[in-house]
Image: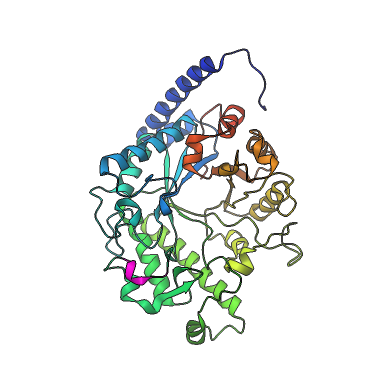
């Protein structure tokens, strides 16, 4: 039921709610400790309630580079505790933001976001700690990787001395002020897959997660220079765009196979940009006028991955309000529900909590009830099995109470994640 007036004071409501959440989180942790069957008995509701914790550019965590190990750990745990208080059940932690690692990887240097110096040991194991502490709280931990982004600048000399991109400059493409691994090179695909799967081998992560970055977002007047790779490896494709999509298809399919081989219980999820193709481009597309189409611009055939069953869940970033003319949440949601219908792939919805209360956003985002309406609408589509919120610092700050409204309207009882 949507928000309604109550005679209970805000303070009394908060105390009551926090007590209930504390009890629920303890039960969830107990369920995690005593095994899956017990958790099923305690919580019949299966629903994704997730939050992204972005580390790139220190967006959410760590709050800045160079903090002590103790301070970094405390900030991470605070995000986990906030997730529990908000009755969430999953954190999606970015552990490979720019071809560097938040765990002691034998393949890539320690991440710049930890110490401010790429390659410097932070003195602790963030991913290992995150898995342990999340599970202790009854939370799932999804390890979030960016496959191809190397740096948010174009200077190879600024990378750690042992960075693979410096050892293999032929793998690198500079584009629009950033460095990327070239997805068209088989050696690159093999390397990034091996680097990411190392975390799956080391830690009992509940899922591997990719976001929306495959080939980079197009920038007017800029060319992604993969001529040589196409000449060498694109012989079966008369159209370069088809070859690029095949490169990404191979990464997704091979990554799925690797995860199943190493840790069969770990799932694989992808969170793409919300528009696959506009209906004006393809009759199978959505009733949208998106300026970006993942199929055509990022060379990511996200619809195919669902229909082929390569991924366990898809979480399109439906970062628009209900009624937004170019990309209406109320039109995209049923489109994605139809894509997922009859497949083995769970559908979760990516939600733009960060827009709530931002004065630069349309008027709908100034209303604390906008996000709650999204969940109300999603309940009409059984294929939509939950939501993930961008991002952690916005869940904590909740500047206009949009997240609190979601909790009050929809999260009165705890839930476990779908399988």
Say above or below: 13 vs 418: above
Quadrant position of the N terminus in the picture: top right
| Furthest residue toward front | 359
Q: Position of residue 38 (x, y in %)?
A: 42, 31
Q: Nearer the viewer, residue 251 or 366?
A: 366
Inspect this view and state whether residue 341 appears.
Answer: yes
Name the one closer to the observer, 283 or 399.
399
328 to 243, vertically: above or below = above
Q: Is residue 158 magenta?
A: yes
Q: Is residue 389 above or below residue 162?
A: above
Q: Residue 151: x, y in percent?
A: 41, 64
- State the image coordinates of residue 355 (x, y, percent, origin top left): 59, 43
Q: Is residue 265 visible?
A: no
| Image side of residue 162 versus residue 81, left or right | left
Coloring applied to the structure: rainbow
**Residue 314 location (% of width, % of height):** 56, 53
Which residue sits at x=41%, y=74%? 172
| Residue 163 is inside the magenta segment | no
Residue drawn at x 32%, y 43% as measured from the top left: 72
Counting every numbered tag in the picture gives 0
Q: Who's the residue at 37% across and 60% down the image?
A: 197
* 136 left or right, relative to 24: left
| Residue drawn at point x = 59 percent, y = 34 percent | 402
The residue range painted magenta reads: 154-159
């Amino acid at each position: 039921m949507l928000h309604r007036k109550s005679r209970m004071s805000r303070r009394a409501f908060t105390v009551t709610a926090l007590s209930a959440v504390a009890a629920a989180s303890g039960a969830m942790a107990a369920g995690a400790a005593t095994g899956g069957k017990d958790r099923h008995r305690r919580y019949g509701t299966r629903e994704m309630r997730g939050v992204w914790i972005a580390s790139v550019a220190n967006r959410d965590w760590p709050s800045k580079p160079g903090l002590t190990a103790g301070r970094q750990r405390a900030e991470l745990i605070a995000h986990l505790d906030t997730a529990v208080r908000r009755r969430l059940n999953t954190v999606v932690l970015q552990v490979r933001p720019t071809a560097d690692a938040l765990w002691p990887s034998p393949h890539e240097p320690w991440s710049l976001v930890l110490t401010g110096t790429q390659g410097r040991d932070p003195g602790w194991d963030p991913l290992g700690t995150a898995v342990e502490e999340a599970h202790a709280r009854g939370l799932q931990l999804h390890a979030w990787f960016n496959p191809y982004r190397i740096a948010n600048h174009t200077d190879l000399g600024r990378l750690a001395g042992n960075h693979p991109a410096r050892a293999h400059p032929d793998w690198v493409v500079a584009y629009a002020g950033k460095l990327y691994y070239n997805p068209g090179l088989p050696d690159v695909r093999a390397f990034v897959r091996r680097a990411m799967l190392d975390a799956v081998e080391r830690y009992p992560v509940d899922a591997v997660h990719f976001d929306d970055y495959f080939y980079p977002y197009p920038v007017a007047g800029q060319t992604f220079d993969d001529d040589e790779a196409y000449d060498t490896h694109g012989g079966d494709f008369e159209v370069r765009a088809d070859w690029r999509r095949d490169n990404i298809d191979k990464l997704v399919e091979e990554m799925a196979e690797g995860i199943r081989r190493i840790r069969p219980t770990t799932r694989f999820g992808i969170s793409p940009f919300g528009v696959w193709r506009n209906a004006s481009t393809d009759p199978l597309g959505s009733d949208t006028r998106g300026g970006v189409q993942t199929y055509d611009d990022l060379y990511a055939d996200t619809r195919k991955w669902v229909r082929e069953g390569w991924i366990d869940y898809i979480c399109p970033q439906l970062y628009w309000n209900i009624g937004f003319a170019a990309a209406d949440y109320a039109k995209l949601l049923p489109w994605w529900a139809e894509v997922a219908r009859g497949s083995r792939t769970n559908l979760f919805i990516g939600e733009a909590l960060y827009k709530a209360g931002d004065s630069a956003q349309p008027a709908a985002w100034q209303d604390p009830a906008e996000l709650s309406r999204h969940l109300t609408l999603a309940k009409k589509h059984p294929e939509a099995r939950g939501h993930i919120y961008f991002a952690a610092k916005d869940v904590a700050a909740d500047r206009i109470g949009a997240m609190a409204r979601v909790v009050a309207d929809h999260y009165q009882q705890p839930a476990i994640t779908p399988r």
